[in-house]
């Protein structure tokens, strides 16, 4: 009886029973007969439960959900070596406590992430702050001390406890003079410059994050939304949700969600300086919406500090320079702002030393005028030099602008990728979500439209096309990626010329797309073209040479040309190692080389690379990050291939621990790790454990995908294989039948996976010597294969060999010769991992020819078989 | 690679979105009552334009989301139980309600395992309960999704409820 019929019966009986008066029910239950009697106990329990029980079902899910998801405020005691004293503050996602380290006696501020489990992204953002802080070491930045995770999964970080007041308050209460205020800002800027040198942008500089201690030390605190400059595609960096930051100090590019960079922190420093020197903010943004605030700030017409009524600057002899300094720091156009903190600091120094500023207002007269003023005695003589000076400045400015353009283009590219990918891959929490409800492709399509409207700016358009194409490629939408990447190549060719190194960069992108499209010849040609252009046009040691080799190596590997792939990848790894053997580029190259070594069978080489990558990933991401799990699985795969199942198992278990902690018990990623582990256990013939691991994976997949999903069937199939190898025919048959049924339903009767399940079922029946039954399912499986696979496919060949065996069992010798020979001919031309089936064919063919009286053929097959058996052993 | 990454992605997407929405609701109003039905509906409104979801019918999405919602609640309940069993270590707990008896978590976990058992023997009925209870699908919606009459839904609901209650009573 199937589940549906049995349920139908239970439900019908139950309905009729509960409509009876209570005292008649037990009699009716007793009267059940035949199949119905099997349900008696269940029905009796159901009737009792129907009347008496209170189920969560009855209250609706809201009643339970509120209690489960709600989280109360903090109650706390001891964390690691620290004793918590009191709460210092509380934000949306974090809470900060003052704590003392008992053994050393020093005080720290400990920040806890609340509800880390809410999403991996949230956790990653917090760990990102940890890593950021750990990188920074500067007297003007609060020092990082310690970090760990509580047993309940709550991560925390301890940093220097700064007993200080906001810089604005400090200046007010101490009556600090204007130039000393500038000197204070300079010290803040030094701290920011240090962060920038570590590729960290603070992005939320404001007086409440810039504290001054009693001893007058400046300390920047709260790198909570700081971001790393390097390109990150796995959602590890933070996104400036507008709600996370303070609009008053936000640069226009932050308010308009444009590319941010080090110049963004320069802007905020400018605003803080403005506030310190004038006692007010440059723009009155209170009560404005983000859109209105952005409109106002983007115009950039803040009143010059020297013209603020009541400001002591009005009569200051450096007032004009201060105006220029702050106007340049707060320029709404990042290209015309101080490019970095260094430039800002230099001009503060110039100003304090009463030298001309590097910054200049739009008119050249300013600088020339100042030059004249300071050299008043020789103005006449200076007229000649002025011309030379102008030329010099123009040259300098142009060179500066070029460098700046290049930096901006790079930042813009990186940032746009980041913005898009963050939206794509972040689960995100409320504070990080984009203001719109748009997601993924909507967002991408909007990007594409924006890009198309940029026809007047082919350079940016090209960047955007390539970026968007890359994202579509990652998403597996290769057709869309194709259009965009080709458009990007075209733009660059038009803009720079076909032999320009920048055009060649785009060719590499196209090559990698062609690889994903399995157009290996095109891919290889494009990659080699790009490599030739770069070799000719870029200096040796440029990172693009190594990048080209990684791309080409991956293409050659995909093509199956392992020796050539190994050659170029080794070169790439060497080149990256010469520059920085801990960089993300190095890791990518080493991983590619490790994979190729693995496929080529060089397990030792693969291992040593994977081990190095593992160390680097642990440093980069922390010990419990999915990329670490991936490295462990790669290491496990080599152990597996070497037959070291114990070692493989240990690695898979460690990876499983990470995926479990990261994604949770019931996530498909956890199921995937469990499946890997299960396979290793099968090979070790540890059947019970293998079954248990696979059953856990199965439970997750059933839960996640439903009982009748192909992902469920693949695990059921694995379980069948365990039973097959244990010669537990009934169990194996049941699993394979279920897998076949799921595939049939899911794929509407037409898919090679149905054939796989049927072919496995055939093995079960051969095992129990049911040759007729085996033939039936093998023929059906073979039909599914021939309908869906190319005629020379390995699966077809194997199925025919197995069919031959089933026919041999029925003594239908000429049919054996027909099927086994056909299968053998195809399989023998292909690679050798299926040797077992070739041996099966040789054995069957020897037997069949012998029975048919062809003793010569029989002897030949027997000899072949013996030779192979000798080779295998 | 698994044959269907789409469903995997859809489930993950729904799961994350539901957690996000739950958190956002709580942030807006402390002690807000959270309705999974509303969350699932909001998740649909939010995700319906996205690539993963666009091809899906609202009903199909809600069915997957119901499964994700169940998981969100089960995870929360497990956490609660785990923290409660914190074995005397001086934990920092972020949850004052821990000291209160937590009947809700235990009840949900019991319901969950009873549902797993129901899914094993009568998968369609388990699916119906899941869709209605965790996804807030109405009886007509479930009827159209499963291709059965509304009357059958009502009959099955009561019978499945009793089945689960009996299973839970048995497990105690």
Image (cartoon, helix red, strand yellow):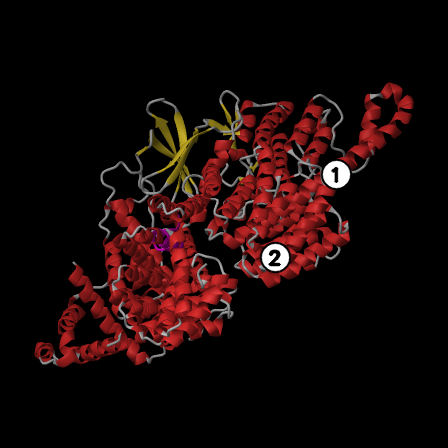
Q: Which one is nearer the viewer's eye here, A261 or A277?
A: A261
Is residue A599 toward the left or the right of residue B30 in the image?
right
Q: Secondary structure at mark 2?
A: helix
Quick one: A239 or A176, which is closer to the camera? A239
- Residue A270 position in % (x across, y down): 63, 35
State whether residue A602 is above or below residue A378. below
Q: Label 1 marks which chain's residue?
A: A
Q: Which residue is mark 2?
A: A520
Give the number of the disc on residue A401. Answer: 1
Where is residue A77 shown, x and y percent of the image?
A: 30, 34
10 Å crowding of disc 1: few (<14), some (14-19), many (20+): some
Looking at the picture, tell me which residue is in the foreground, A622 or A521: A521
Residue toward you, A529 or B109: A529
Judge if badges 1 and 2 mark residues of a common chain: yes
Query: Magenta region: which residues?
Result: A662-678
Q: Is residue A130 left or right of residue B160?
A: right
């Amino acid at each position: 009886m199937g589940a549906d019929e049995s349920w139908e019966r239970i439900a019908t009986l139950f309905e009729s029973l509960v409509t009876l008066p209570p005292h008649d029910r037990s009699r009716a239950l007793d009267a059940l007969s035949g199949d119905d009697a099997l349900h008696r106990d269940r029905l009796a329990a159901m009737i009792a439960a129907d009347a008496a029980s209170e189920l969560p079902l009855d209250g609706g899910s809201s009643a339970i959900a509120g209690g489960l998801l709600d989280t109360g405020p903090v109650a706390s005691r001891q964390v690691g070596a620290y004793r918590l004293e009191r709460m210092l503050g509380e934000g949306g996602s974090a809470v900060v406590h003052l704590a003392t380290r008992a053994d050393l006696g020093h005080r720290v501020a400990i920040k806890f992430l609340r509800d880390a489990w809410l999403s991996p992204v949230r956790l990653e953002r917090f760990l990102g702050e940890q890593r950021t802080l750990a990188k920074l070491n500067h007297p003007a930045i609060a020092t990082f001390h310690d970090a760990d995770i509580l047993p309940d999964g709550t991560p925390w970080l301890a940093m220097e406890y700064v007993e200080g007041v906001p810089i604005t308050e400090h200046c007010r209460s101490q009556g600090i003079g204007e130039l000393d205020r500038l000197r204070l800002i300079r010290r803040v800027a030094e701290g920011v410059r240090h962060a920038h040198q570590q590729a960290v942008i603070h992005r939320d500089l404001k007086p409440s994050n810039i504290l001054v201690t009693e001893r007058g030390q400046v300390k920047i605190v709260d790198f909570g939304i700081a971001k790393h400059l390097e390109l990150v595609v796995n959602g590890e960096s933070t996104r400036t949700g507008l709600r996370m930051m303070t609009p008053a100090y936000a640069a226009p590019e932050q308010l308009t969600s444009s590319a941010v960079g080090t110049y963004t922190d320069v802007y905020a420093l400018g605003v803080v300086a403005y506030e310190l020197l004038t006692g007010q903010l440059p723009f009155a943004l209170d009560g404005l919406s983000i859109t209105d605030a952005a409109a106002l700030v983007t115009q950039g017409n803040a009143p010059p500090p020297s013209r603020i009524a009541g400001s002591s600057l009005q009569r200051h002899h450096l007032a004009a320079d201060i105006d220029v300094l702050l106007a340049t720091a707060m320029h709404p156009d990042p290209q015309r702002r101080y490019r970095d903190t260094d430039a800002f600091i230099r001009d503060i120094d110039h100003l304090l030393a009463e030298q001309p500023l590097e910054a200049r207002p739009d008119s050249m007269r300013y600088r020339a005028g100042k030059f004249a003023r300071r050299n008043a005695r020789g103005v006449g003589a200076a007229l000649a030099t002025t011309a030379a000076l102008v030329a010099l400045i123009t040259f300098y400015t142009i060179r500066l602008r070029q460098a700046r353009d290049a930096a901006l283009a790079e930042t813009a590219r990186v940032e746009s990728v980041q913005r898009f990918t963050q939206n794509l891959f972040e689960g995100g929490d409320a504070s990080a979500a984009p203001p719109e409800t748009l997601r993924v492709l909507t967002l991408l399509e909007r990007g594409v439209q924006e890009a198309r409207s940029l026809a007047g700016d082919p350079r940016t358009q090209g960047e955007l096309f390539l970026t968007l194409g890359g994202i579509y490629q990652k998403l597996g939408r290769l057709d869309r990626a194709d259009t965009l990447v080709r458009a990007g190549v075209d733009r660059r060719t038009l803009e720079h010329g076909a032999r320009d190194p920048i055009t060649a960069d785009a060719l590499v992108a196209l090559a990698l797309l062609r690889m994903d499209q399995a157009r290996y010849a095109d891919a290889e040609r494009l990659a080699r073209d790009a490599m030739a252009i770069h070799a000719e046009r870029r200096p040796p040691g440029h990172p693009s040479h190594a990048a080209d080799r990684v791309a080409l190596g991956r293409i050659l590997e995909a093509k199956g040309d392992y020796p050539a792939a190994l050659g170029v990848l080794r070169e790439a790894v060497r080149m990256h190692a010469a520059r920085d053997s801990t960089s993300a580029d190095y890791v990518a190259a080493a991983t590619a080389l490790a994979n190729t070594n693995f496929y080529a069978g060089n397990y030792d080489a693969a291992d040593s690379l994977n081990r190095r990558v593992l160390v680097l990933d642990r440093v980069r991401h922390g010990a419990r990050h999915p990329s670490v799990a991936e490295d462990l699985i790669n290491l496990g795969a080599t152990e597996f291939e070497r037959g070291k199942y114990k070692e493989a198992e240990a690695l898979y278990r460690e990876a499983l621990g990470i995926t479990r902690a990261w994604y949770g018990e019931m996530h498909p990623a956890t199921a995937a790790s469990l499946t890997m582990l299960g396979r290793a256990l099968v090979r070790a013939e540890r059947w019970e454990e293998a079954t248990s691991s696979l059953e856990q994976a199965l439970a997750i997949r059933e839960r996640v995908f439903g009982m009748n999903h192909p992902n469920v069937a693949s695990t059921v199939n694995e379980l069948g294989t365990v039973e097959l190898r244990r010669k537990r025919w009934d169990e194996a048959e049941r699993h394979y039948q279920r897998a076949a049924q799921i595939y049939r339903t899911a794929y509407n009767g037409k898919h090679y996976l149905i054939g796989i399940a049927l072919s496995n079922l055939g093995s079960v029946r051969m095992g129990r010597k049911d040759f007729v039954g085996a033939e039936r399912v093998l023929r059906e499986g073979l039909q599914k294969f021939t309908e869906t696979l190319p005629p020379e496919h390995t699966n077809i060949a194997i199925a025919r060999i197995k069919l031959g065996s089933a026919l041999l069992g029925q003594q239908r010798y000429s049919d054996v010769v027909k099927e086994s020979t056909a299968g053998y001919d195809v399989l023998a031309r292909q690679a050798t991992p299926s040797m077992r089936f070739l041996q099966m064919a040789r054995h069957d063919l020897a037997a069949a020819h012998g029975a048919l009286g062809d003793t010569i053929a029989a002897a030949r097959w027997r000899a072949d078989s013996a030779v192979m058996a000798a080779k295998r052993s | 690679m698994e044959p269907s990454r789409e469903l995997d992605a859809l489930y993950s997407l729904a799961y994350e979105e539901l957690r996000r929405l739950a958190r956002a609701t709580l942030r807006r109003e402390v002690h807000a009552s959270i309705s999974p039905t509303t969350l699932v509906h909001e998740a649909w409104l939010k995700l319906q334009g996205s690539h993963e979801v666009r091809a899906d019918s609202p009903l199909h999405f809600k069915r997957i989301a119901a499964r994700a919602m169940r998981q969100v609640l089960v995870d929360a309940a497990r956490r609660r139980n785990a923290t409660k069993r914190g074995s005397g270590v001086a934990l920092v707990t972020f949850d004052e309600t821990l000291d209160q008896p937590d009947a809700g978590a235990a009840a949900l976990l019991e319901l969950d395992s009873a549902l797993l058992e129901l899914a094993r023997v009568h998968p369609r009925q388990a699916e119906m309960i899941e869709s209605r209870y965790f996804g807030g699908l109405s009886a007509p919606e479930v009827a159209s999704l499963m291709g059965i009459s509304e009357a059958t839904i009502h009959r099955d609901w009561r019978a499945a409820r009793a089945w689960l209650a009996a299973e839970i009573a048995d497990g105690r």
